[in-house]
Image (cartoon, rainbow, N blue to C red):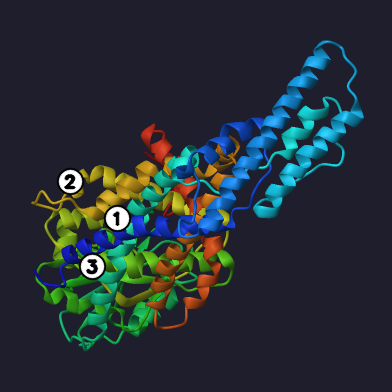
Amino acid sequence: MKITSPILFLLIGSLLTISLTFIIPLICDPLIAMIIPLKSIGRGQFLAHSLAAVQSQDNIILDKQKDDEQSAWLEAGRVISEATKKITILNSELELKKTNHQVINREVLKAELEKIKVLLIEVNAQLAQVVVEDEVLNSPPVLQYTEQLVPIIPAYSSFSGNAKASFLIKITWLIFAFFFLLPVAIMLPLHWYERRKLRMTPRIIPGSPKVSLILPAYNEEKFIKKSIEQALKQDYKGEMEIIVIDDGSTDKTLAIAQQCALNYPNVKVYQHQKNSGKPAALNTGFHKATGSISVFSDTDSHLDEDLVSRMVPHFDDPKVGMVAGMIIIDNEINILTKLQQIEYLYNQEIVRFCQHTHKGVLICPGAATAVRTKIAREIPSTERTVTEDADFTFEVAEAGWKIAQEPEAISRTDAPETWKELIEQRKRWLYGVLQTIWIHKWALFYKGTKLPNPWVWWAWIGYITCPITTLAVLAIPLFFWLIGSTYLIFLAAYSLLVGLIYGFAHWYGLKQYVHSDKKKLIVLMPIYMVYQYILNVLLCYLVIVFALRKGIKVRYGGRNIHAV
């Protein structure tokens, strides 16, 4: 098997994940043990936990190489046991006097408490910081005092000593390792190897075949002229035509496009009398195209001059039917658009490029895609989902064609600048992809084989588990209430580790973009993680309404529709 095979990197990533899954807790847990402070807890909790920990050395992290430290722990346990017995006896005597309506001598009580205090100071001298309240003689005198006085001696218990925190942390860590660490451990080495090889390959500017560049447009008077002009600047050496499909626009889109057609003979304009939607406009463009390769984009996007010439060479492989381009956000003007830029670059540079390594790209974006014209005529684009580009890509794959990506074929687009616009966009995208993978259940396995397609399985797992991951975050206060602050300390330590891995993966994705410095966006990673959680909450809602067959209302092209 060749080293370029993704299967080899699957094995490497799996071994790396298994190693890190067990090694990281071995490193992390002792560090947590060093930073967790001693805490004061009530007498009941002390009797339930501290004495049990003292009696079982397995439940206390002891440095077996330091006998003096171990002796200190055991001596502390002995002193605390003695203090606890005195407190218990004192409480019993006071309760008895209270029951018999006997007078409690406050001076005697204070003297007894001072004796206990001396015992606890001995512990403080060795290990703990003892908290003693000044006002302790309120009623009931000793019970209130001891609830605040007795400290827990084991600063940190191992997994066997803190079963609740242990179970939750273990489960959380294993879920993270499987759903995120494993994909990253596979994708980053695979990407590094294949991307490096691609950059070392000399670029060849093709001179043929003929290309038809299709621009569907609906009420795009602000962008249509710029889109046509950018299309005319392509450095492709072969013959190329530009086809504009006006999909029933009610503004000046048609007039502007027709004026461009008068000035440039290779610009052709066709009109729909009424708005029929982008799929219908694309189908018209494919049937009017005279080139053997059709490249389609959105008219609110503009193409880099080398987009066509970078895409066409992929069709030298007769098995390749479609090629995805790279979408870059052009309006990086606020934090929200910068967060989307991080998302775009990671998903395309890392995830989609890894799909490209075995010519199995799942979704070719509507803003930059090339397809063999004969395929587009045989497999029309439809409106059965609200993401026609995803559905169209799956249809082409089902027909047996390979689907590639060209990461240097760049189309620049404006991203939503407000949360309202973003939610509306992502609602359509996320729901449309869910519709697509539901329709194309065959894609769970590679066409004509019994081999599972990990990318489709990954997508399904993400949709199915998103309610669980959403609720898990919301349940953190509940876990804190049930288990205590130990859970939060474990969670913080492991979350920091997760954040570092997550941040490195996205930094690596930003680093791949060489046309400008995007690495500085990594400083937004803490905000980006919150951004992703908000989108996950939205996804959770969409999964629920899809499962209930309620559907959603979205703006699709020039129409408001109800998608089920």
Amino acid type, label 1 = Ala
**Residue 121 falls left or right of residue 172:** right
Of residues 52 and 232, the one drawn nearer to the viewer in this rendering: 52
The tag on residue 390 is 1
Q: Give the structural element (helix, strand or loop) at label 2.
A: helix
Q: Does residue 186 appear anywhere in the picture?
A: yes
Q: CA distance from mark 1 to mark 2?
A: 15 Å
**Residue 463 falls left or right of residue 439:** right
Q: CA distance from mark 2 to mark 3?
A: 20 Å
Q: Residue at x 29, y 59 (%)?
A: 363
Q: Give the structural element (helix, strand or loop) at label 3.
A: helix
Q: Residue at x 73, y 33 (%)?
A: 147
Question: What residue is shown with label 2?
Answer: 442
Structural crowding at the residue carrying mark 1, measured as other residues with C-alpha within 10 Å and reported as few (<14), some (14–19) or many (≥20): many
Location of residue 46 with respect to 430 vertically, above or below: above
Structural crowding at the residue carrying mark 2, measured as other residues with C-alpha within 10 Å and reported as few (<14), some (14–19) or many (≥20): some
| Extreme-top residue of the structure | 100
Q: Position of residue 49 (x, y in %)?
A: 57, 36
Q: Nearer the viewer, mark 1 or mark 2?
A: 2
Amino acid type, label 3 = His
Amino acid type, label 2 = Trp
Question: What residue is shown with label 3?
Answer: 356
Q: Position of residue 266 (x, y in %)?
A: 27, 80
Contact between marks 2 and 3 (CB within 8 A): the answer is: no
Dot 1 or dot 2, earlier in sequence: 1
Of residues 419 and 75, the one drawn nearer to the viewer in this rendering: 75
Contact between marks 3 and 1 (CB within 8 A): the answer is: no
